[in-house]
Amino acid sequence: MKKILDLITAEMKSAFTGCGYEESYAKVVLSNRPDLCEYQCNGAMAAAKAYKKKPIDIANEVVAALTERSRSQAAAGQTPVFAEDGVQAVMPGFINLKVNPQYAADYMNGMQAAPKYGVEEAGHGETIIVDYGGANVAKPLHVGHLRSAVIGESIKRMGKFLGYDMIGDVHLGDWGLQMGLIIEELRDRKPELVYFDESYTGEFPKEPPFTISELEDIYPTASGKSKEDPAFKERAQLATYKLQHGYAPFLAIWKHIMSVSLADLKRNYDNLDVHFELWKGESDAEEFIPWLIQDLKDKGLARESQGALVVDIAEPTDSKELPPCIVQKSDGAALYATSDLGTILQRERDYQPVKYIYITDKRQELHFTQVFRVAKKAGYVRPEMPMIHIGFGTMNGKDGKPFKTRDGGVMRLEHLIADINEAVYNRIMENRTVSEEEARDTAKIVGLAALKYGDLTNQAAKDYVFDLDRFISFEGNTGPYILYTIVRIKSILSRYQEAGGAAAQGSILPPAGDGEKALMLELAKYNEVMETAFAETAPHKICQYIFDLANAFNSFYHDNRILSEEDKARQSSWIQLITLVKDVLETCIQVLGFGAPEKM
């Protein structure tokens, strides 16, 4: 379904070219003075210089052409795009536009009948890889993992909605020194385990030698010990080397670490309603690394620098100096860049994506610049391959510093979710109209919306303050406010049916008032917002849209007594209109990664 702005622009282009001007001057934008008009074109201002005319003269010519076109459309039985007297030239040369109410209603009826309410599937099944999550095994998810998960999940859902085959990969940290640290700490705690008996030749136990709670204690203990005990760190490095070179006992321990950690990670991500198609890790790239190093050497891209292997990535057009990418340390060990390049080779082999999107902390910007450039220089991806790094800012406390627990520690994600759910539950119980059990269930839905919307409503690159009281508020630009609007519409529709209201019949009628028309024009932005938000990987644009749409609905609702309207045709039209509002809002929040309850 064509975007309403494109349809209006097409009318404007016809008028400009009909008057002998280039169509490039016919750009239409939303009005910045909604009290005067709904859309505006400032092209006459720019055209005046090129054509050596007064801007107002050009604007008057174009307005005359548009007015004549509208008359011709009406005479031919077509609905003109612009309202009668809805096209005006204003000094010094602005063109103010108002849409024909019937045209707005026709567009609503078109949305109502169209698949996905008019959003076209641009993806055609093409594959896009979204790399988000970035959790480390053997460690619990904490608030630092929140933004990657929430932003990544929303972008993946946005692409899927537009018809792309979106593949989300958690890309676990599962192959570095942390594994050696865990193995050696386990040796110190349980030296009797068969994994540490070099004479043992039997099968290794199927049951892991630790619980998730024990594992989550083992790693920080080992990490702290390695900083104070050089001998322990050396043991851990040796254990890591032996693991990465296939030593069977340590591989068996590694598999236990993976199984215990993955079960816990999946449970925590499920609580966030975040899901991955792939649970790959750094270890999965290991098989590609020897070939990768040799290939970079063979192509003359890798050179030695102080014993390490590096690839120069700087280009003449760079505005700042960029250091080379280190692909192998002097001791022969691989690095994160090597692992990420190996992962790209694996993804190219298995999925042939048309785009890559990585979501991490913005401090990793240089790392991904290096990786992307090496991948293109080496020919692992085509030169024009879109490789996007979305670097997100920090979630801070009210003190402006990274969010911590009250005792100064890093808060576990499950504890943050529990705190939000409890706060929402208490808010619901203040005006208790439901059972405690129903309040608990509703609190989980609303709490997740509060958390995700509170994050996504910000531009990803910006830091933001986590303000629990504001996030769970039912007023203002918050997740609960959006859900409350949806639940309000559901309630109206339910009461309409309970009162014997027949299924809405006929078409949506032209708006009877300004508030109704404003609601229609807000709805009409839907397909453009969904396409633009994904093209710019900007979930915050969907958040802003649904906030504006919710406000437009609530203004309309306060001005019109929908359930007591005596004109049944008008009432039926309103029921259809607010049903469309509900459907669009629910579609948007599902794309953002949360849902709405039936009651609040």
Image (tube, grey):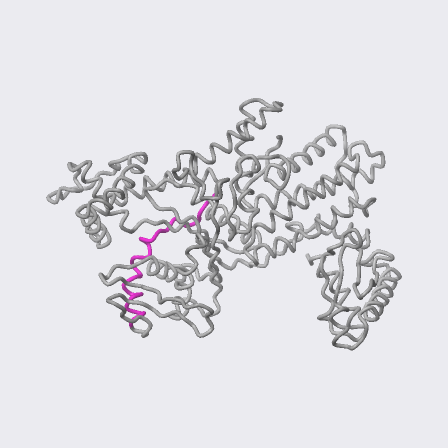
Quadrant containing the N terminus in the rendered view? bottom right
Vertical side of 440 occupied by 359: above or below:
below
Foreground residue among 114 and 355: 355
Vertical side of 318 occupied by 476: above or below:
above
Q: Residue at x 65, y 38 (%)?
A: 486
Judged left or right of residue 245, residue 361 is right
Vertical side of 463 occupied by 468: above or below:
above
Q: Residue at x 86, y 67 (%)?
A: 64
State the predominant SS element of the stretch in magenta: helix
As for residue 79 lying within the magenta part, the answer is: no
Q: How many marks?
A: 0
Q: Position of residue 340 (x, y in %)?
A: 37, 58
Q: Position of residue 437 (x, y in %)?
A: 53, 24
Residue 322, image quadrant: bottom left
Tell me where the magenta segment starts and ends, as one range. 274-297
Judged left or right of residue 178, residue 431 is right
Foreground residue among 393 and 436: 393
Judged left or right of residue 225, residue 63 is right
Residue 527, image quadrant: bottom right
Quadrant containing the C terminus in the rendered view? top right
The extreme left residue here reads 199
Q: Position of residue 36 (x, y in %)?
A: 80, 54
Q: Position of residue 349 (x, y in %)?
A: 39, 62
As for residue 277 lying within the magenta part, the answer is: yes
Foreground residue among 227 and 540: 227
